[in-house]
Amino acid sequence: MIKGFCKVGMIENARKVFDEMMCGPNLITCNTLINGYCKKGDMENARIFLCRMVESKDCLPDTVTYSTLIDGYCKKGEFNEAMKWMDGMLIRGCKPNLWTYNAIIYGLCLRGNVDEARRLLTKMRLNGVKENVATHLSILKGLSVAGKSEEAIGYFNEMIRKGMKLDAKEYGVVIIAYCKMRRPDEAISLLKEMQVRGISRGVGSFNAVLRILVEIGELDKAVLLLKQVKNMGCLPNLVSYSTVICGLCRSQGRMQEVGDLVDDMLQDGFEMDATLYSCLVSGFCEASNEEMAMRAFNDSINKNYVINVQSFSFFVNLMCEKGRFIEAEQIFKDMCRRCSLVDVDSYQRILDDQLHKHQGR
């Protein structure tokens, strides 16, 4: 029962069962409860429970107990606390195992101390503990987080040369590293390599590549990749579509493609949101297409979405340039009536400024 409650995060129920046990607890039961506290992020109760184990001497903590606590502290970013308990387990004669070392290496990498993590990797080998892929994944992530993308790529290639069985997590780190270096072609090559190796790819990796393609102006490649995502064993999400659609809206002469992608997005079951409506309004205004801009604006109002201030400014400016002052004022009134505007004054000021500029009032 204790294990079951801990598994579903019902740690209070698990503790109640523990306290009501007729027989004395064994080490497995105690470790299960501490693990439950740690998974919930309740490190204080986990610490208190371990301290009571030490004090009672009925059920002394072992390497698993300490490693559980150390891992919990590292995952919460409380590395100094983790090291205190690492020292404590050594004093009490408990030898660190793979889990212990992996937790500390993860904690070091989280702090950007990749060199120290590598030294610890050497130490654990000397102590007869063989590392696993998780050990190297922490270092790989650490290099990427520390901005050492080139080193991360080299480390990843070394892992492949050593015949390690890598999955989406390792590939994902390197794909992000390539994106940080603005090298989307290599990132796309890795996505294709994953497909060949039968490794499932999360949509987040595709979105990272789509984002960098849009940022560097490679819109044709972004559109092509978005259309290929399904054939590569993954499904695009709203972020995928939004990234490319908004990129096209900011580029001149591509609103027809925007319409096609919006149709694809709707067919895939995704709905327009405030960000997409803002992009559409801005894009149509940039193309001087006030009819389509007004249609997109009205659609957003009907769905209770508020376009951003910048898009509203583009819209009002275009409508005033076309002499459609009354319609500009009316759509603003509709927006105020139908939608929850957080900053009405900013929108009102934009409207007043444009009317004054074009009408002199």
Image (cartoon, rainbow, N blue to C red):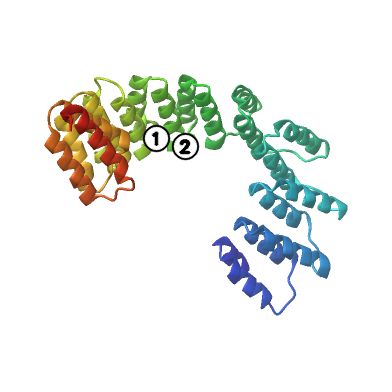
Specify the label residue 304 is tagged with: none
- Rendering coords of residue 119 (x, y %): 77, 33
- Rendering coords of residue 186 (x, y %): 49, 21
Q: Which residue is mark 1?
A: 233
Residue kind at label 1, given as amino acid type: Gly
229 or 194: nearer the viewer? 229
Left or right, 135 with reference to 313? right
In which quadrant will I find the N terminus? bottom right
Q: Residues within 10 Å of mark 1 (few under 14, many from 20)?
A: some
Residue in view at x 61 percent, y 65 percent:
3
53 or 167: nearer the viewer? 53
Q: Residues within 10 Å of mark 2 (few under 14, many from 20)?
A: some
Left or right, 154 with reference to 234? right
Query: Relative to 139, is 184 above or below?
Result: above
Mark 1, secondary structure of its residue = loop
Mark 2, secondary structure of its residue = loop
Choose the circle earlier in sequence order: 1 or 2.
Answer: 2
In which quadrant will I find the C terminus? top left
Residue in view at x 86 percent, y 55 percent:
92
Q: Which residue is mark 2?
A: 200
Residue in view at x 64 percent, y 70 percent:
15
Query: Relative to 113, is 24 above or below?
Result: below
Residue kind at label 2, given as amino acid type: Ser
Cα distance in 3D space between marks 1 and 2: 7 Å
Q: For the residues labelled 1 and 2, say whether their Cβ atoms are less than 8 Å apart.
A: yes
Residue in view at x 48 percent, y 33 percent:
198
Inspect this view and state whether residue 266 appears. yes
Inspect this view and state whether residue 280 appears. no
- Rendering coords of residue 332 (x, y %): 20, 42
59 or 182: nearer the viewer? 182
- Rendering coords of residue 83 (x, y %): 77, 47
